[in-house]
Image: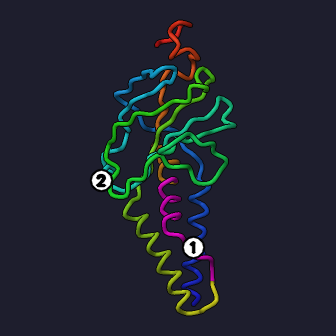
Amino acid sequence: MHNVRFLLSSIVLAWSVGASAQVGQPKLTVTDMQVFCQGLDPFVTLTFPVNAQDQARPGILYVGMHDPSMSQAAFLTTSSWVGYSGGLFPAYSVASAQLGRPRLTLALPQNLAGGGWKLYVGYGALSVQSESRVQQAADAIAAAKAISPKPVIGAVDPDHYRRTLVQTDMTQAGKFAYVETGVENNPFVCRPETGGGG
């Protein structure tokens, strides 16, 4: 029983450390980027920068923005931009099999054009070691329940744990890139009559 308790406490500690890890510096570079307009709405197309060793791994793609003071942030999901107030980052796309190196077209918020908001894209990969940690956590909970009907610790949600490890992989390893679209500094990028790029 002592070994089970120790394993469970170790898992929780690792989980909490991973979830609160400091964000490193961006280490990726976006390629093949193009900005275009549909009406008054700016869009950007780009090739998502996934490292070669991660392309065959499952993982999550993230698309986010923050204001100049870094006091506000938003993430793009598959359907819309959503404000961020803490916790796990909203995912743009979940790759359950392999990340690959996708080509994306992203809608940029027209109302934020020229406001200095910076666009970032990033990803986290689920390594073999991380998947093993998820399985160990599930096995430890099952072993604890088999020994005692009273819960030793709250149940581990494997999907939430995977997402925590994937997000930590992105933030700690710097697997994200700043996308300099020009929209962040030009409020008229899709308004050629007022000096934008059109």
| Residue 15 location, quadrant | bottom right
Return the mark for residue 10.
1
In the image, the segment drawn in magenta is 152-167
Q: Residues within 10 Å of mark 1 (few under 14, many from 20)?
A: few
x and y, in percent, of residue 163 in the image: 50, 58
Residue that numbered label 2 is attached to: 56
181 inside magenta stretch? no
154 inside magenta stretch? yes
Q: Type of residue at label 2? A: Ala
Q: Is residue 96 above or below residue 195?
A: below
Which element carries disc 1, helix, strand or loop? helix
Near-viewer residue (47 or 2)? 47
Q: Residue at x 59, y 88 (%)?
A: 2
Q: In this view, does 111 lie above or below 28?
A: above
Q: Type of residue at label 1? A: Ser
| Residue 115 location, quadrant | top right
Q: How crowded is mark 2: few (under 14 residues within 10 Å), some or many (20 or more)?
A: some
Q: In this view, does 16 lie to the left or right of 197?
A: right
Q: In this view, does 81 lie to the left or right of 86?
A: left
x and y, in percent, of residue 46 in the image: 38, 31
Q: Which residue is drawn at 48% across and 48% down?
A: 170
What is the distance, in whole Å, between disc 1 and disc 2 at their CAs?
Answer: 29 Å
x and y, in percent, of residue 181 in the image: 48, 24
Q: Is residue 188 above or below residue 78?
A: above
Q: In this view, does 32 lie above or below 124?
A: above
Q: Is residue 58 left or right of residue 122?
A: left
For the N terminus, the quadrant is bottom right
